[in-house]
Every structure is written in C-alpha cells, then in structure tokens.
Amino acid sequence: MKKYLLYSLLLVLNLPTGFAQSKIWTVVMEKGTYSQAYEGSVSFPVAFINKKKAAREYITDLTYGAGEWVVTTGTTRYTAQEYILSTEFPKDWIDKQWTAGYDITEVAYGDNQWAVIMSKNAGLTDENWGKRSSFEEIKALIKTKWNDGKDIIDLAFGNGEWVVTLAKGRDYNQQTYNWGSDFPQQWVNSKYKDNYQITGLTYGEGIWVVVMSKYTTPKQEAYQTGSDFPTAWVNQQWANNMRVKYMHYSYEKDLSNSFNEYFTAASNAANKNNHDLAIHYYSKAIQIQPNHATAYNNRAWSKYLSNQCLGGLADVNYAIKLDPQSYAYHTRGSIYLCLDRCREAANDFEKSIQLTAQKEGHHYSYKAEAERCLGNLDQATKDYNTAIVLDPNNRATYASAKAEIKEMQDELRVAPTITWDYPYLAFTSSTESGYNIKACVQSEAPIESMQLLINGTSFTSRGFGIDDDCTQSLKQKITLRDGLNTLEIVVKTAGGSTRSEKRTIEYKAHGSGNYHALLIGVQNYDDFAINDLNKPIADAKQLRQVLTSKYTFEQGDIHLLENPTKDEIINKLIYLQERLKEDDNLLIFYSGHGMVKNEIGYWLPKDADKNNRAKWFSNSELKDYVNSIKTKHTLVIADACFSGSIFTGGYRDITEFACAEMEKITSRRAMTSGANTVVPDNSIFLKYLVKKLAENNTSCLSAETLYSKVKPAVIYNSPNNHIPQFGVMPQTGDEGGNFIFRLK
C-alpha cells in the first residue's frame, strides 16, 4: 500500500497495478481540501470501510476493475451510511433503508455481486431506482423521470442489467448524458465550456456512459483517461488541492473484428470468473458467427454461473439445435437444476453420459444431484459410487455427498410421514355434520399402533387399512360437532410417536358457505411517471392476518396479489368466477393508486401507463366481475384515491336488520376509504379497519356495523377529515342482504 501525506490530510492509495495496455481507466477530480482516502482490494475492503466510518468518513465513490474493488472515502455531508453486497439486486434491503431515512448514493457491480451504498443526509427526496436489461430501456426510464423533475444520481451496469437511481434535491439546474464505444472526450470538453460538470460515469455493453450536470455553485474539475491508471496525474492533481470524484474501469479490449479474438477473450475472462465480461465477448463473437454452437453453449454456461438461468436456457437450446454435443446437454442439465426442473436435468445428464466416449466422475456427480432433487436417493447413491470409481482424486467430495443422502434416508426410515388427502387444508369449514376424512401413512419402520384424535379424544373407528401406495391408510366418515373440530393422527413405531399436522374443520350449521378473499396491493409501478407507494402490500398482509386469525377465512382461500398487472388481476377474478359457489362469501380488497378520468373511476395495476388507460382497471370492469361471481355475499373494500367513484351517483347508508336474515339475502356491497378525493399513502382507513376487526367480539359482525365503527375514527384522525363511504354496488345483483364477518 502506498501512502501520501499532503497538507496534513491522510491520503491512502492502494490501486490495481500491471494493467494490460488494452484496458482503460478514467478518473475525474474536483477542487477540494477535504480529507480523502482510497483502498484497492481483491475482496471488498470491509475493514477499511469500517475504520473510515468510525472516523465519520464515508464512501464517496466505488468501482470494480482489473479484479479489484476500488473504494474512495472522505468527509461529506452524510451523517450515517450503510452498504450491502448481494448476488441479486437488493430491492427489499433498499426499501428497508428508505424507511429508516437513507438514500442510495452509490451502486456498483463486481466479483459477481451488487454493491449498494445508502447514506443519511444526502439531501435527496422522492428517490427511485429502475433496473432494465438494455441501455435503450434504461434511457426510456431516465426520460420519464426527467419529465418528473428528477436527476440521475447514479448509473451502473452489471450481470447483464442496467440500474439507474434518480431523485430530487441535487444542486443541478440542467442534466444531460452521452454514450459511445469510446470515452466521449470531445463531447465532455464541449460541455465544460457550457459550465457542465461530470456527475456520473459507468461502462457496460461495450459503451461508456457519461452524465453531466450544471451546478448552481460549480467547482473546478478535470479528468484523465488512458490505458493504465493515471497515477502520476492523480498525484499532481492532489498537490493542487484536487480530490478524486469518480473512477471507472472499462473491461473492453482493443480487438479487431475477429471471431477468434473475441472467443479467446471471452474464454480467458470466463477462466478468471469474470462472467459479465465473458458474456460480453461471447456476444461479440456470436455477432460475427451467428451459428457457432460452442459460443452459444459457452455463453449459456457463463450466464448460468451468473445466475441468469433463463437467458442461459435460451442459449443452450439453440446450441443443441445447431450441434447436439454431450457438453451442451451437460450445460442444459445444470441450467435445469438451477430452475428446479429436476426431471429434465436428470434426462439431460443421462444424455450427456451416453454421448461421452470418455466417462468422467463429474458426469455422474451432476446426475446424482438431479436424482437427489427428484427424491431418487438410491439412484443418487449409485451415481456417486460410479463417480468415486472414475475419479478417485475427488473421492472425499463424493463421499461427503453420499453421507448427506444416507442421513436423509435414515431420517425417512425413522420418522413416518402422515399426509392428509382430505381435509387437505389446515382449516376448512362444512355445512354438513357428516364429513369424510382420508389420510395416508408411509413408514419404513413397522407401525406398532395408530390413533385418530378428534378434539384430543381417541375416535373409535372401524380400523385402519392399506390403500394405494400407503403403508397404512385412514378412510372414515366422522360426525362433526357444532363449531370447531380438531383432528390429529398419532403413529407409533419403535422410534417413538409421530403426530400429523392438525386439521381443523368448522361445522357451520347456519349454512353460510365458505369465506374467500382477494387482496390486492400495488405499490411499485413500471411507469416512472406514477409515484411508487410504501404501504399497500403491508396493508394487505395486515388485513390477511386478522381475517385468518380471528374470522372464518382459511389461509388457502385468501389470494394475495403483490404488485399485479391488469391481466393478473383479471385472471384471478376469472379463477374465482369459475370456482366459487352460490353460498360462498367473497371479500375483495384493493390498496394502491386510484384515478378518475371523464367521470370513470379506475384502479391502477403495476403495468399501468399514466398516459394510456388501456392497462387501467375500471369500476365498470370490476362491477362486471362482481356481478358474474355468483356468491351469496360480495364485499369490495377499496383504499385508494377517488375510490368513492365506485358508487354511481354517490353513496348511501344501508339499514341493518337481524344478522341471520341478512345472511340469507344476496348482497353486493362496497366500502371505500374516501369519496372522489385524494387519500394519504399512510392509510388511516386501513389502520382503523384492521383495529375494529381485531377488537370485535360479536359472533356476527355485518359490513354495515363495521363501517359504522370505522367511519368516525377515520374522520376524526385523518389529516383532511376524509369520510369513508359505504353502500350498494349498483347493477351487480344486490337484493338487500349484507356481508357478515363470523368469528372462529
């Protein structure tokens, strides 16, 4: 590690050395006298970052090049900082950090993982990120967000994908960017004359991308680009009180338009586990020879090792179509395993073995993994034995895998498995007192005794038998008592007693049918012109929890759609249309953006386009589906802006009468968080809806009674005195009844 001491500021430099002449570095520096430090390391420099963090010096730039991470830290406006390394882009972690007041300040990709840096007090507001598989697609996202008044905060490429971060709050008046196969020096120099400065720098898909912005208060800036890292120039600039602003590395080699050179460069990159670069060069080679089977196979393998298994499958399928070699079947078998398509993986590994003249141990070890995935443990053991014979040098690895299989087999032999055929779900209900139950027991060890317990008491039956592939089976009609009936099977072997999962059947003599729910939460939108929300999915899950824990909604009868498209919403409604019966009850809940256009109300699914209503879901479409789903009762609850538009001509309260009478009469009702107004993302309506459901202790709670409890609480506690609405959904078949929430 080289150390420099300038003006009493510690400047630590440990940069990659020995770069080939064909590799390109670009470094941007700006005027400043603040403390700054650098670290270059093959592994992510955690110790260095933590040491600087303790001194309140935070990451200001991050890149990966020539097999090393290069991190720049310095004194900044940040008051705290967190980071994550992840093979998948860490969207859930980002959401969590946003909630804690952090903003994305740096994103980079290297060593087959994403690095995301998030900082507090970054001065940003309304931040979003977007990920796309091509630069053309990411440009479209940038244009949309620019129109929304946001600026590019960071742009990165990795694992075949582009990621852009945009937000408001930067000290920019204008912003632009340029791209090309070479660093756009002429363009950058011309923009300097117009008082623009570099505010973003990245490389991907064979192109440099440079972002430039006009600051309200500009700083002096300079850059240098060349085949090697410009160490001498950086030292000179440090002496002039300049500090590193951005560093970036181009992995592109200066190759001629030659298939062999691109193919060789790709193979060298793959051998060094730089699969992002390998995919790039194989793609270049394929452009020159578009029917080269080996290039397609090798690109598929690099995609597989980069966890891009679907893309790899398309490549290897084409390779096999061009030239069905054993190695291509091996590649496809590995990709099938990645996709959990175990049967197809086993078939391809078997095909690879058949086509291979010289059998090797790893051929059989891969097939063993596929057999293990299928549950064929005996065959997997045989394949590992063959691998040991063919490849004794790796005996320890294969023997370890065999030992794991033996442990699995021993566990299976000791503990019987008890499977319920019906009731299949953990909780179900019945309107008939007589109920047929069936269960299958499989056991390697001899069964000493079996017992059926109903509500903890042994049930005297005509006995257990043998059925199908079961060691023993239970097939019996039992009589249910009114209310809850809990079933459990106890099987005793020499190894001890094994209990089945419990099954609970509620006998509902009133004959109200089963309770179903469709819960829809939309918070992330494809169109950057539509602001994302924070709460809808969490709200839907909160409602699901109270429905399943307190009321007669079975977990298996609640359908939760997280960020669905319009087609996914419609497909689920069609599913319910085909399966629900006339004595069933259906609750439909929606949380997300709502709109009114030309006096027509809409819900906005994930794929909605702000400027095109083709993917909006209208109230009239909802009413058509509600009318076509032949339930006894359907209740729609909408927590969205302008949700009151669901009531044509406003809303009206409904007179309530005896619970048993209401339950007999068909109803189609709706409850909304407000009228034709904007409601907040942090839903007061949902808070009190769930609260009143949780507090209820009456066995029969009508939707009208629930509304009467929720309405005043929302009015008194919402910022703008929002008034929830309740009433009949017109033209949907309502006959005057009401939706009833029944306690378990």
Image (cartoon, helix red, strand yellow):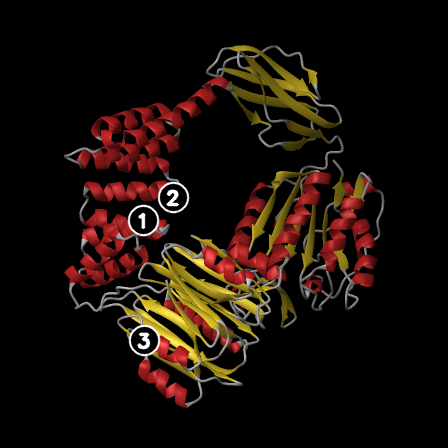
Tag 1 near tag 2, CB within 8 Å: yes
Q: Is residue 725 left or right of residue 316?
A: right
Is residue 679 visible to the viewer in this orientation of the structure? yes
Closer to us: 429 or 661: 429
Q: Is residue 244 left or right of residue 637?
A: left
Q: Which residue is mark 1?
A: 313
**Residue 194, image x and y in percent?**
42, 89
Name the residue: 30% across, 35% down. 366
Q: Rounded to the nearest whole Å, what is the CA distance between mark 2 and mark 3?
A: 49 Å
Q: Rounded to the nearest whole Å, what is the CA distance between mark 1 and mark 3?
A: 47 Å
Q: Residues within 10 Å of mark 2 (few under 14, many from 20)?
A: some
Closer to us: 633 or 283: 283
Q: Residues within 10 Å of mark 3 (few under 14, many from 20)?
A: few
Q: What's the amino acid at mark 3?
A: Ala
Is residue 564 visible to the viewer in this orientation of the structure? no
Closer to us: 636 or 117: 117
Q: Which residue is mark 3?
A: 232
| Above/below status of 391 relative to 489 | below
Closer to us: 244 or 267: 244
What is the quadrant of the C terminus in the image? top right
Q: What's the amino acid at mark 2?
A: Leu
Q: Who comes first in sequence, dot 1 or dot 3? A: 3
Q: Between tags 2 and 3, which lies in front?
A: 3
Q: Which residue is mark 2?
A: 339
Q: Residues within 10 Å of mark 1 (few under 14, many from 20)?
A: many
Name the residue: 53% across, 17% down. 473
Tag 1 near tag 3, CB within 8 Å: no
| Above/below status of 732 relative to 380 | below
